Image (cartoon, helix red, strand yellow):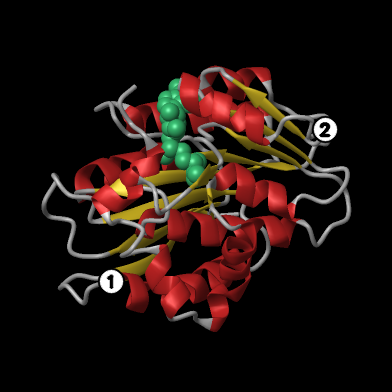
């Protein structure tokens, strides 16, 4: 396990993922019944962007710092959350900030240091459980939740060549156990072929109601670079496509460098 999220926290991919995640949770909270959230690849929960890893890559400078300097109305909710939490919130802290009394969050993280940091962060928090366990195994063990309503975030490190296949299989297995859950999966866009194969696998799975949202910083031609990223959402809440479009429209002009091929895409992979 070489991947450490501290080097990438607050970069354009985090901003896109976290802004959409906050929108999704708020939309699901329009109903008053309790929610369960499973964060399968949680990281350490929060990141000091003045620390060496973030400073060394400068990714947050081209990500969240740009958004904070030039805040756009569609992003106010996400940016207010970031400001109010102090350190840059990873997905667990962002989700925790949105939970209502009666909602629950379960976080899984395999890296020993990050799992320990997460455990300390949520020490004595009765709404949050931290598990040092494998994400893919957790999808079987922790689903379906007793609340019967929930969101599952799958945000793997994409270190291995077969991660798109693993992600598709994980989504299909998770959906089989929790058919009405909202599943949110992050994926990198380096070049198009693996993304196309992933979308085809999800379409062919027979799962209905899938939307993909993508932000491209440039034409995805160089497979050695992170040219963009996407979120695949199963069972998106009402009006997700319009909400996602507004968020991407606000993100792209600030996060992009006006390179050829910049784009935002909201596409339906399978119908409702
Ligand atoms: C992209 S980071 C997660 C970032 C986090 N979701 C956020 O938005 O702040 C991926 C994390 O998954 C962890 N990880 C890698 N393989 C895992 C596995 N099989 N099960 C659980 N965690 C894993 C890594 O240690 C890393 O912290």
Q: Nearer the viewer, mark 2 or mark 1?
A: 2
Question: Considering depth in this image, is 129 or 223 the residue closer to the camera?
Answer: 129
Lower sequence index among marks 2 and 1: 2
Question: Considering depth in this image, is 85 or 24 the residue closer to the camera?
Answer: 85
Residue that numbered label 2 is attached to = 126
Q: Residue at x 50, y 81 (%)?
A: 72
152 is higher (above) or lower (below) than 189:
above
Q: Which mark is residue 256?
A: 1
Q: Report which quarter residue 161 is drawn in.
A: top left
Q: Report which quarter residue 183 is drawn in.
A: top right
Classify residue 167 as left or right of residue 128: left
| Residue 107 can be seen in this image | no
Quarter placement of the C terminus: bottom right
Q: Secondary structure at mark 1?
A: loop
Ligand 1 is located in which of the four quadrants? top left
Classify residue 84 as left or right of residue 189: right
Q: Report which quarter residue 25 is drawn in.
A: bottom right
129 is higher (above) or lower (below) than 26:
above
Q: x and y percent of residue 112 in the render? A: 48, 19
Q: Which mark is residue 185?
A: none
Classify residue 43 as left or right of residue 190: right
Quarter placement of the N terminus: top left
Question: Considering depth in this image, is 53 or 229 the residue closer to the camera?
Answer: 53
Question: How many numbered marks does the figure carry?
Answer: 2
| Residue 206 can be seen in this image | yes
Q: Residue at x 27, y 56 (%)?
A: 58
Q: Residues within 10 Å of mark 2 (few under 14, many from 20)?
A: few
117 is higher (above) or lower (below) than 195:
above
Q: Secondary structure at mark 2?
A: loop
Q: Residue at x 80, y 36 (%)?
A: 127
């Amino acid at each position: 396990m070489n991947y450490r999220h501290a080097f990438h926290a607050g970069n354009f991919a985090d901003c896109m993922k976290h802004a959409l995640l906050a929108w999704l949770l708020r939309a699901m909270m329009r109903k008053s019944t309790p929610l369960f959230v499973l964060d399968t690849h949680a990281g350490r929960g929060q990141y000091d962007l003045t620390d060496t890893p973030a400073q060394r890559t400068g990714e947050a400078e081209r990500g969240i710092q740009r958004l904070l300097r030039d805040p756009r109305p569609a992003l106010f909710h996400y940016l207010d959350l970031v400001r109010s939490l102090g350190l840059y919130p990873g997905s667990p802290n962002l989700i925790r900030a949105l939970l209502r009394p009666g909602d629950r969050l379960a976080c899984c993280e395999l890296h020993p240091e990050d799992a320990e940091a997460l455990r300390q962060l949520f020490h004595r928090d009765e709404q949050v459980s931290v598990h040092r366990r494998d994400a893919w195994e957790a999808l079987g063990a922790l689903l379906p939740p007793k609340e019967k309503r929930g969101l599952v975030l799958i945000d793997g490190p994409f270190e291995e060549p077969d991660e798109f296949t693993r992600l598709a299989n994980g989504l299909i297995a998770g959906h089989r156990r929790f058919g009405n859950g909202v599943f949110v999966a992050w994926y990198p866009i380096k070049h198009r072929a693996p993304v196309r194969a992933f979308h085809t696998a999800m379409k062919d799975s027979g799962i209905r109601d899938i939307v993909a949202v993508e932000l491209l910083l440039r034409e995805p031609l160089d497979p050695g670079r992170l040219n963009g990223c996407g979120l695949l959402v199963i069972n998106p809440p009402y009006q997700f496509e319009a909400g996602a479009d507004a968020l991407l429209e606000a993100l792209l002009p600030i996060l992009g460098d006006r390179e050829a091929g910049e784009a935002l895409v909201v596409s339906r992979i399978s119908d409702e």
